[in-house]
Image (cartoon, grey):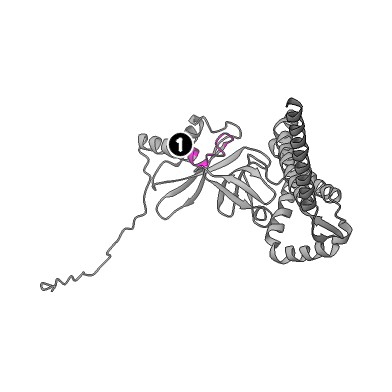
Amino acid sequence: MRILGVGILAQRGETALKEIDNWFEHTRHALNAPLFDLGGTSLTVWTLLYLAAAVLLLFYFSARLRRWLSQRALSRTSLDVGARQAIASMTHYTVLVLGLLIILQTAGINLTTLNVLAGAVGVGIGFGLQTVVSNFVCGLILMFERPIKIGDRVVVDSVDGVVTEIGARSTKVLTNDNITIIVPNSKFITENVTNWQYNDPTVRFRIPVGVAYGSDVRLVEKLLLEVAAAEPDVLDSPVPAVRFLAFGNSALEFELRAWSSSLVHRKGRLTSALNFAIYDRFREHGIEIPFPQRDLHVRSGTLNVRLDRNPG
């Protein structure tokens, strides 16, 4: 009985193995079944699965490589953040292009037979994706020429903020309201761009001030310089200056010019602090800050006024 049981189990095991072999054989035939031809190669389900898995792994490892280069490997060098990100991005795109070519070759797709398809895709890109391609090319120009860098304070197309990321298609700018605005890269190439920190982070602030006619202009100059000297965010060198600009319609127009390197990203904060201090100093010394007004002088004649007693 024991021998008979062992024989039955062995027979069942052989049957199960044959069924598994048959299943694998059917699966192999299904995966290797041709679907369509591309580049002189018959593509199968297995080829498509291989291409999908290989491309996903390529994008994953290239992204990891970019982060590793910008955050670890290049951080040990003297390069700034913008240069590190530019090098990492260019390496990322180079690995993607070379990796896609290698994947297609290993899948058996002959790239030389795809010239017609590539030409058709190029025409489609030229007409339908010209804006995207333009932004991509502009992104490469930004990475090579580096007119703007990460951390720069820029103003472009009414967007005022700090550059936080430069990508292949767009650049992210963080405003003082903590709002990230995504600006197409073409804006930084075709528009006028103000970069507050391109050469030197030191920036001159201009504070307009108007005082009433009859004020002591030398005292006004002295007080404005004292206000600038008392503000900790105003630099001692270059020295602050006061300019008497014009005789306005309602006021004598002055301008306080002060330099700062610590509040370039918070221009409104420094301007507000100086205006508060100027107002307090002027009030202490009796200097009037006028508002627009008009005086009416009647030289001769009489003024007739008619009162309507029945307005209804």
Hey, which residue is sitting farthest top in the picture? 2
Residue 53 x/y as whole percent: 74, 45
Q: Which residues are magenta?
A: 260-270
In magenta stretch: residue 269: yes
Location of the C terminus (image quadrant): bottom left
Of residues 293 and 55, the one nearer the viewer is 55
Residue beneath label 1, please?
273
Of residues 256 and 138, the one nearer the viewer is 138
Location of the N terminus (image quadrant): top right
Residue shown at the point (67%, 55%) measured from the top left: 186
Q: Quick check: 218 above or below 47?
A: above
Hey, which residue is sitting farthest left in the picture? 309
Of residues 229 and 215, the one nearer the viewer is 229
Give residue 237's quadrant in the image.
Answer: top right
Q: Regarding mark 1 in the picture, which secondary structure is present there?
A: helix
Hey, which residue is sitting farthest front in the picture? 1
In magenta stretch: residue 171: no
Q: Quick check: 47 above or below 203?
A: below
Side of 230 where 105 appears, left or right: right
Of residues 195 and 30, the one nearer the viewer is 30
Query: Of the residues shown, which amino acid type is indicated by label 1?
Result: Ala
Crowd rating for badge 1 (residues with CA inside 10 Å; few <14, some 14–19, many 20+): some
- Residue 209 seen in the figure: yes
Residue shown at the point (48%, 32%) measured from the top left: 226
Give residue 35's quadrant in the image.
Answer: bottom right
Q: Quick check: 206 above or below 281?
A: below
Residue 297 x/y as whole percent: 29, 62
Residue 102 x/y as whole percent: 84, 47
